[in-house]
Image (cartoon, rainbow, N blue to C red):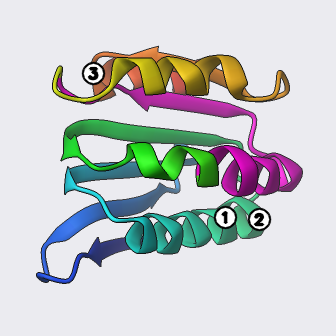
């Protein structure tokens, strides 16, 4: 299952894919994000977690230029609790380029509940290897 989410300019800013063989969700964020698109992509990810019994997600922010800071409250208060209740256990987060806000990413790391193992990575390949070892 693959799905692309576009902004108002018809540019794909989120690519969501369920990797069936390896049983994880790959979410790639590119360009500048918007809260409506982020929420739509998160709702699709929640459906996959619930329907497939998926316990792992890889959030690849290496192509993101900005605009996701506003979404952290949504991720922490709405997405994460639902995802955990549906069975999510591992969250691999590929950090955005240096222009991103490292303080906000650090906030996520210490704010997620302990039942969700959250790790930061520099590359999607490192994140994937970690997920597959779980």
- The image's mark for residue 115 is none
From mark 3 to mark 2, how far is it between C-alphas? 27 Å
Cβ–Cβ under 8 Å for marks 1 and 2: yes
Cβ–Cβ under 8 Å for marks 3 and 1: no
Indicate the position of residue 113 as horizontal and vertical percent values.
Answer: 81, 28
Q: Considering the image in quadrants, where does the C terminus appear?
A: top right
**Image height of 133 relative to 19, above or below:** above
Indicate the position of residue 90 as horizontal and vertical percent values.
Answer: 66, 31
First reached walking from the N terminus: tag 3 or tag 2: 2
**Image height of 8 relative to 97, above or below:** below
Q: Nearer the viewer, residue 101 or 130?
A: 101
Residue beneath the point at 21% across and 43% down? 64
In the picture, measured across the screen, residue 25 lies left or right of residue 65, that is right
Name the residue beneath numbered marker 3.
Answer: 123
First reached walking from the N terminus: tag 3 or tag 1: 1
Provide the secondary structure element on which disc 3 rests: loop
From mark 1 to mark 2, how far is it between C-alphas? 6 Å
Residue beneath the point at 51% across and 28% down? 92
Indicate the position of residue 46 as horizontal and vertical percent values.
Answer: 67, 64
Name the residue beneath numbered marker 1.
Answer: 46
Q: Which residues are magenta?
A: 75-97
- The image's mark for residue 50 is 2
């Amino acid at each position: 299952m693959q799905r692309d989410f576009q902004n108002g300019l018809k540019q794909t800013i989120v690519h969501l894919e369920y990797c069936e063989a390896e049983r994880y969700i790959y979410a790639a964020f590119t360009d500048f994000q918007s809260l409506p698109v982020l929420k739509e992509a998160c709702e699709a990810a929640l459906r996959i977690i619930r329907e497939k019994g998926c316990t792992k997600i890889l959030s690849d922010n290496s192509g993101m230029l900005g605009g996701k800071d506003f979404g952290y409250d949504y991720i922490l208060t709405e997405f994460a609790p639902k995802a955990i209740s549906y069975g999510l256990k591992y969250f691999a987060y590929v950090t955005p380029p240096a222009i991103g806000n490292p303080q906000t990413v650090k906030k996520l790391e210490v704010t997620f509940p302990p039942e969700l193992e959250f790790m930061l990575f520099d590359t999607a390949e490192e994140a994937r290897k970690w997920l597959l070892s779980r």
